[in-house]
Image: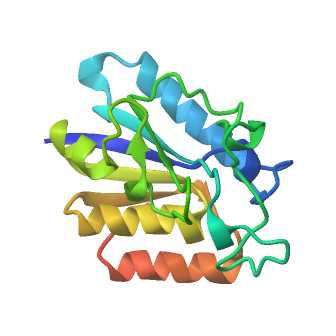
Amino acid sequence: MARALIVVDVQNDFCEGGSLAVAGGANVAFRIGELLHQWHEAEPGDRHYDYVVATRDHHIDPGDHFSREPDFVHSWPPHCVAGTDGVSFHPNLDPQPFDAIFDKGEYAAAYSGFEGKSHEGGHPLADWLRAKGVTAVDVCGIATDYCVRATALDAHEAGFTTTVLTPLTAGVAEASTDQALLDLRTAGITLT
């Protein structure tokens, strides 16, 4: 029984200064970066996680997910466009410890990391985790009310024991974040 940390979409465009910035995103990146450094420096037998993976929005042509007049619910300004700096991990987050990175949303909206495929081999996240013997996941990242919510719900639905590390998340808006946390709690997901 292995445990994995899933770091969701801690990218330049979702942090302050990005095209779709979430307040507190850079601070979340910093705190997750600290956790990753502690994990990376620990002896293998003392590590809380057996694996650490990351998801990234990686848009090429996501259709009506991008809009010149976004509603900020179903459509958004262009963000995390493949080949731009916005798609990169925030500099406060050291991506070196990641065992795998899963890109999502190339040609359609994709909120859940479980819609992504790994760089190496093109494996879906659930298949990759199962192949490693992972039975439990902790989820953190950006944004609580969208991609973190969707990733955690899909993890739970896929049969993984799921915890959301709420101090290591940032939401787009207070009302939608509160609703997301209620949805996660109602689904039986643990919130810290």
| In the image: residue 164, left or right of residue 92 | left
- Residue 181 coordinates in the image, percent (x, y): 49, 75
Q: Residue at left 59%, top 47%?
A: 58
Looking at the image, residue 144 lies above or below residue 45: below
- Residue 152 coordinates in the image, percent (x, y): 39, 63
Q: Residue at left 60%, top 27%?
A: 94
Instruction: Please identify the quadrant where the C terminus is shown.
Output: bottom left
Instruction: Please identify the quadrant where the N terminus is shown.
Output: top left
Q: Does residue 170 show up?
A: yes
The foreground one among 55 and 106 is: 106
Q: Residue at left 28%, top 19%?
A: 44
Total marks in image: 0
| In the image: residue 39, left or right of residue 132 | right
The foreground one among 88 and 140 is: 88
The foreground one among 35 and 55 is: 55
Looking at the image, residue 192 lies above or below residue 97: below
The foreground one among 90 and 28 is: 90
Q: Which of the 4 image quadrants contains residue 69?
A: bottom right
The colour mode here is rainbow
Q: Residue at left 35%, top 83%?
A: 186
Looking at the image, residue 6 lies above or below residue 72: above
